[in-house]
Image: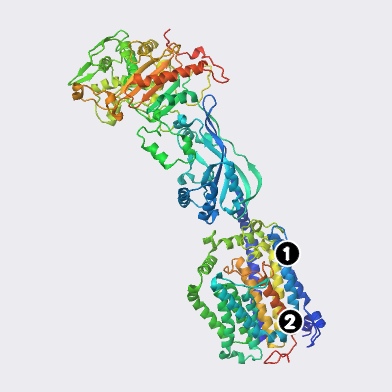
Amino acid sequence: MRGASRMFGPSRVNKSLWQRLRGLSWSMVLVNLAIACIGFAILYSVAGGSLDPWASTQMKRFGILFIAMIVIAVVDIRVWMALSYPAWFTCLIMLLAVEIAGAVGMGGQRWLDIGPMRVQPSELMKIAVVMALARYFHGRDFYQSRRLTSLIIPAMLILIPAALVVIQPDLGTGITIVGGGVAILFLAGLPAWIFWSAGIAVAAAVPIGWQFLHDYQKNRVLTFLNPESDPLGAGYQITQSKIALGSGGLTGKGFLEGTQSQLNFLPEMKTDFIYTVLAEEFGLIGGLILLSLYMVVLTYGLLTGIGSRSQYGRLLAVGLSCTLYFYVLINVGMVMGLLPVVGVPLPMVSYGGSAMMTWLIAYGLILSAALHRHVNLAPKGSGLA
Amino acid sequence: MFSRRAFMIAGAQFLGFAALGARLYYLGVVQGDEYRVRADKNRVSLRLIPPVRGRILDARGRDLATNRQDFRVFLVPEQAGNVALTLDRLGRIVQLDDRDTARLMRQIKRQRRFLPVTVAQGLNWETFSRVNVSIPELPGVVPDSGMSRAYPAGPSVAHLVGYLSTAGEDEIGDNPLYQLPGFKIGRQGLERQYEGRLRGTAGTRRVEVNSVGREIRELPGRQEATPGEDIHLSIDLELQNLAAEVMGEHSAGAVVIDVRTGEIVTLASSPSFDPNDFALGISQANWSALMNDQRKPLLNKCLTGQYPPGSTFKSVVALAALEAGVITEETEFFCNGKHPLGDHVFHCHLRRGHGRVNVSQALSKSCDVFFYNIAHKLDIDKIAEMARHFGLGHTLDIGLEGEKPGLVPDRAWKRAVLGQRWNLGETLNVSIGQGAMLTTPLQLAVMTARLASGRLVEPTLEQRAYGGDFMFGNLPVKPENLAIVRRGLEMVTEVGGTAHDYSRGKGKAKLAGKTGTAQVRRITRAERVTGVIKNEDLPWEMRDHALYIAYGPVEAPTYAAGILVEHGSSGSKVAAPIARALIDRAIELENGTVPREGEEVASVPAMLRPQGEVS
């Protein structure tokens, strides 16, 4: 425990803002900053060696959200616990709003315009589901959680937003929400046989669920299974992506020298396929460095959970770590041809604000959980008087 | 319990990252080389530089087929995305009507998506600039300023030069040159025949392309195209034009050969078409008109038209008879207009008969009975042998597709083809150039050139360099016999000859000639009794073909001509003036009597003067 105490800082429960800032895990803040900087560099390269139009915009967004992450980190975790259910309901209302607006004629709309910002409620929902579940299981001891009846509310907390997201349609985000939720159920102590049977049930449901998929989603899965079958159509992206990744070799073609990306062979290269550009220009080494940085920050989240005293803090940190992990796994697995193309960005690196926002807010919460790991929360509530 | 499960999750996360890392290692290091090759294939495209097609020039270096700057617009369907929308936008600039659009859409459907279709060509600079300015809104549209084929000489050389058109799907095969937008290949005539020489060799350049195939930059290693070879023809455009003019509306073919070199100076077929119409894609109406014309404008009658030579063949028969010793210069036969054979009566074209005629008179008056008499004594195989010496019965290989061999019938031919024995009546028919005999106008001209020079003149369409030696070997005949035939042919144009040359202008060369009439229909015995219907009273397609062969000047022949006018009725009235006009002009052009710009008149070397000349 001495090692852990050195790792997570001083153990006093109520600290001043200054103490909390000092206690913040700055090394993790720096690793996040490093990931973001890699993103800026690639966006600079994708623009043909120019800050405009992408890198500069991305930097401004990051500036704001980075400060937001630190603010979230120093806010007492009890505040976040108190806000868990309201956050879930707010996100649900926003999702419904998007759903209705989309139905009214915007097609598959995924975002809401709030003032100058464009917010994607499904992104925030990823966090809110983890918060709400953590809140639900907080105060229920391990053996209480094993009762099947106590599964009804968590199932609704997960499935209602997931269903809304999937019909948007945004399969990737839906999977991430379910994945994060299931991770918490697992951690909360649900019997292992439930996961086994759920796994079997999902496998059985695949042929049925297949019929409910949109044609383009079906195509993606089919193309994933055999990308070379349609090298100019649906398989084009993945074929070109693999060519770019593979041609990078061990050390890459050099910064700004990625021929496949610079010559527009890659679609979506500033968003979903940005990892490909990195691997083409910096090779295996560059690709592994970015993966390692992700692994460091995500492992820190898991360790935070393990080291937390409160059930809420544990579930929040590990659940968010899993949510963020799915982001990275699905995106990188997708561009490498290991997973179907589901349109998930690489957080902090892909151009766009939503994924970055999710990542930094979630990581702010992980940092907050780390900062407040010794806080012993009341079983039933936030612990705030 | 929580920690155990959290560590399980940590392990799963680590495994996931390990899998990603391993996959990256597999793609980049294990398969890296393969992907690097594929990346280069993606990126580097070998583009062809089309060669400039060689020109076709006449004997004086005038363009018969040349290239001119042409602004045009292509569409590559594969790159266009929404083809209809792009065409609609483009159509507002280059003026496409609904029919054009429909035609283009059909064409796009027919061919492979990466092949460009020509949307518009022959654009002016202003329209072309407007297309270029609008390129950002026109995906897949490729403006191009290239060379297009032009035929400044137009219809008068159409049969000779042919035309170009886009290679068909089946011809494209593996030849990437054919896939270039607007690349065309020779379709007929010399354009087709000399395709290999005219085309040249494509150059190559390596370009870096982006995903839609747009060029980003050129990489080093450019190889320039080798332009096609210019073809210098022996044809004289002025004569060719004159031939077209004098043949007028007739369905006819005229060939003029330089007796000394075998160079074909005129090879004209009428009616004709404008090859420029084909260069820009011929309209359906225009095409049907050409196809449905009974005078067959698309056929080169000089090579592909096979006609009985009629009386023009008598010159060869006479020579064969003299050579065989069947007759001499003095041998006379009596002509009363009829020549019975068995229960059949062969008629002379002159019903009242020619009286006593010798060989020269028989040629000049074209007495049929004289040759019927010869036929009794001269075996058909002897006639056929002599005919072959004169270039009849086989192709002359002047390098144009579609040349027909004609037909010289003999015993072997009849046995092989009909399985029957030869009979004498047929020899009688052949002796006056009828029966199964078939010749092309080109063969007639060559036959005449050989008669005029006594040499085995071989025709050619390309210029022959004058060597220091005789160009051709001698005909295997006695010069004195040749002189007798020539005397007969001279008399044709004199008073009492069938083609008494009223049209011989003052100071013009004296020509030797021979008329011919080839019957298209059989004249029945009943018709002979009631009187043969005059040609003018018959429908056009039943009238006789009119033929004429000529050479001149008789003192030292330089040019020989073979003329055929389909259903022209009279060789002397219709065909002879054409020969006269052409040979006159050919001589004038050579002598500089008609001034030619910057031209020195080459005198004829003495050694090239014809053999067996009667002075």
| Subunit bearing disc 2 | A
- The answer to whether marks 2 and 1 sit on the same chain is yes
Q: Nearer the viewer, residue B539 or B555?
A: B539
Residue A35 in sight in this render = no
Colour setting: rainbow
Callout 1: SS: helix
Q: Is residue B517 visible?
A: yes
The correct choice, above or below, for B158 with respect to B355 in the image is: below
Quadrant location of residue B518? top left
Image point (37%, 33%), residue name: B296
* Horizontal side, residue B482 vs residue B357: left or right: right
Q: Quadrant of the C terminus of chain A?
A: bottom right
Quarter in which the N terminus of chain A is drawn: bottom right
Instruction: Examine the rendered structure and indicate whether residue A263 appears above or below residue A157.
Output: above
Residue A56 badge: 1
- Across and down, in percent, residue B16 comes to 63, 73
B516 to A48, vertically: above or below: above
Judge left or right: residue A290 versus residue B554: right
Residue bearing the label numbered 2: A368
Q: What amino acid type should be assigned to the residue bearing mark 1?
A: Ser
| Tally of numbered tags | 2
**Which picture quadrant has residue B543?**
top left
Across and down, in percent, residue B571 comes to: 34, 20
Residue appearing at x 34%, y 23% in the figure: B546
Mark 1 crowdedness (10 Å alpha carbons): few <14, some 14-19, many ≥20: some
The answer to whether residue A151 is above or below residue A98 is: below
| Amino acid at pointer 2 | Ser
Subunit of label 1: A
In the drawing, does residue A130 fall left or right of residue B312?
right
- Tell me the distance, in whole angstroms, between the alpha carbons under discs 2 and 1: 29 Å
Dot in front, 2 or 1: 1
Residue A248 image position (x, y, % from top left): 66, 60
